[in-house]
Amino acid sequence: MRNFVLILLIAVACLAFAIAGHVYWKQTIDATVQAARAKMETFAEQEEKANQTEAALARAKRLPADAQAAIKRAVEENRPIRLVIAGSESTPEKGGWPDLLKQALDEAYGEGTFQITVHEYEGLTTAAADRQRIAADWASDKPDLVLLEPFLLNDNGVITIDDTLTHIQSIIDQLKSAAPDAVVMLQPPNPIYNATYYPEQVEELEAFAKENGYPYINHWPAWPDNQSEELNKYIDPESDLPTEEGAKRWADALAEHFIAQ
């Protein structure tokens, strides 16, 4: 009887040991599989993010290096690229070239890749814009990029170009103090027909941008010559603002900088 009990206890112990070993082995295998799966998922996510970054930078390669770096940072942080567009009534919040540019960026980069906010300041001069500290509007958007169309048309005949440039610098300084990582890019307003001093002011703006290291996007080569009446097809001679065709031409010119084919 004692031998039978001993044998039974040994059998039970062996069975318990076998079951425990099987459970431990299964748990170990499951943990290994889960760890491998998690590692593969992490690798896949990293690879996908790397591919997204590479694709975005390939599209943005015509932009300045600082702008590319800002785009790279936003993509790696898995958030939209925050682009603020600001300017005069030549840069309308609705129904103008900014809307068309947004459509082009959504098509090229994927919808939602860029988060675009447009700030239109109708009738402002650079002096008024500086005094009203409009850069605070942009800083609250936490921009990666700011595309600024200064108020040269509104300043024309009212404020000297030297004063205009001083106010532009002040506006940029206001922005950088509140949003130091924002990359500011300058562009001129639209051309106007048969202007005399205005083209010289635009040249001064470009020289100012280069001298101070601000990226400058010159879309004027995309327009007809400002001494040609053909320009009136794209710029309304009554308002000096882009027509529907002019808005498209402006947006297309900017898209060439933002989107490398």
Image (tube, helix red, strand yellow):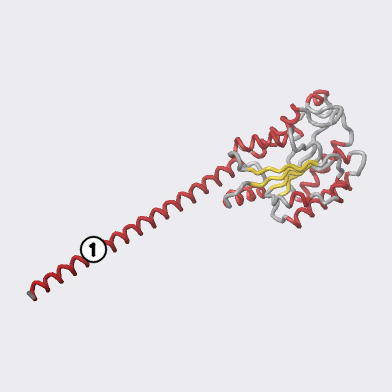
Horizontal placement of 49 versus 247: left or right?
left
Hey, which quadrant is residue 197 in on the image? top right
> In terms of depth relative to the viewer, which is nearer, 122 or 150?
122
Residue position for label 1: 19
Look at the picture and state if 151 lies above or below 142: above
Horizontal placement of 246 versus 45: left or right?
right
Q: Residues within 10 Å of mark 1 (few under 14, many from 20)?
A: few
> In terms of depth relative to the viewer, which is nearer, 140 or 235?
140
Look at the picture and state if 104 lies above or below 165: above
Say which residue appears at 80% left-offset and 37% top-offset. 189
Horizontal placement of 79 versus 172: left or right?
left
Hey, which quadrant is residue 23 in on the image? bottom left
Amino acid at pointer 1? Ile
Q: Where is residue 98 in the image (x, y as percent from the top left)?
A: 72, 37
Q: Position of residue 121 (x, y in %)?
A: 81, 42
Asked which secondary structure carries label 1, the reply is helix
